Amino acid sequence: MVTLMDVHPVTLVGRVVRLEPLSEEHVPDLATIGLEESIWRYMLYGNIDSQDKMHGFVQDLLARQARGTDLPFVVIYLASGRGIGCTRYLEIRPRHRGLEIGGTWYGLDYQRTAVNTECKLLLLRHAFETLGCVRVQFKTDARNKRSARAIERLGAVQEGVLRNHIVTPDGTIRDSIYYSIIAAEWPAVKARLEEMLRSGERR
């Protein structure tokens, strides 16, 4: 008998951030923090530079959630109680106990801090220890060297490159690098992330 993952909205709490289910109530915070154009350079949504565009972005993610393909989270910075970015599960495959972590962005002041490390720890721990995943994947634009380095520092294994994979909003034909962590690797990855947080190592 195949055991299916039970993926549903949940709140994940760490010492620096809280990941809570995304809602339209988060639009004002996200619209404010997301005004810097460089945030969106390698993202697939175009430049989200107004509250109306952010509202559309959030509505799209909620529609994906309703279809069962995605589970979006807002990243709440505990020190301020404000939304500082988004992340999500996507490509959810309950029968095969796999999913992707992606669509992640943060305001510029929170990049290269403990925020991303803790977000990944919370999401990976929930995926492997609660949902029972056997595989979690990541992908990034091959041009986005910083994102690739950050994924590699998690301990994810590069699997290959999908050439001419996606046409971006500006017309660029993008190659995508795929990575994964499998269940057998999770204990070592978990220990590494916990040590990074203890030592204050940045993404």
Image: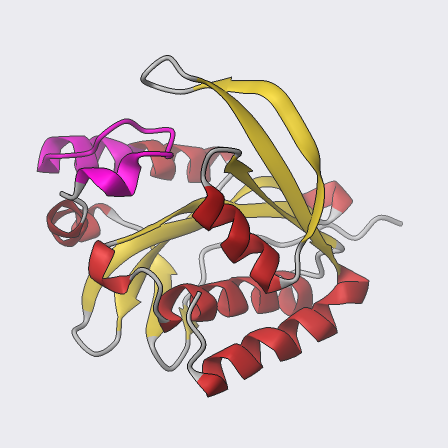
Residue 196's spot in the image, x, y percent? 51, 78
Q: Classify 5 as above or below 79.
A: above
Which of the two residues, 30 or 97, is positioned nearer the viewer here? 30
The residue shown at (57%, 20%) is: 165
The residue shown at (76%, 62%) is: 183
Magenta span contains residue 56:
yes
What residue occupies the far bottom of the structure in this picture? 198
Q: How was this image coloured?
A: secondary structure
Residues drawn in magenta: 37-59
Residue 17's spot in the image, x, y percent? 34, 72
Q: Classify 35 as above or below 108.
A: above
Magenta span contains residue 39:
yes
Q: Classify 16 as above or below 97.
A: below
Q: Classify 49 as above or below 174.
A: below
The residue shown at (32%, 29%) is: 45
> Is 56 left or right of 64, judged from the image as shown?
left
Residue 192's spot in the image, x, y percent? 62, 76
What residue occupies the far right of the structure in this picture? 1
Q: Quadrant of residue 48?
A: top left
Residue 16's spot in the image, x, y percent? 34, 77
Which of the two residues, 200 or 126, is positioned nearer the viewer here? 200
What residue occupies the far top of the structure in this picture? 171
The residue shown at (38%, 72%) is: 114
The reply to whether residue 93 is in sight is no
Q: Quadrant of residue 85?
A: bottom left
**Quadrant where the C terminus lies?**
bottom left
> Is 112 left or right of 198, judged from the image as shown?
left
The reply to whether residue 79 is in sight is yes
Q: Give the total of numbered labels.
A: 0
Which of the two residues, 4 or 73, is positioned nearer the viewer here? 73
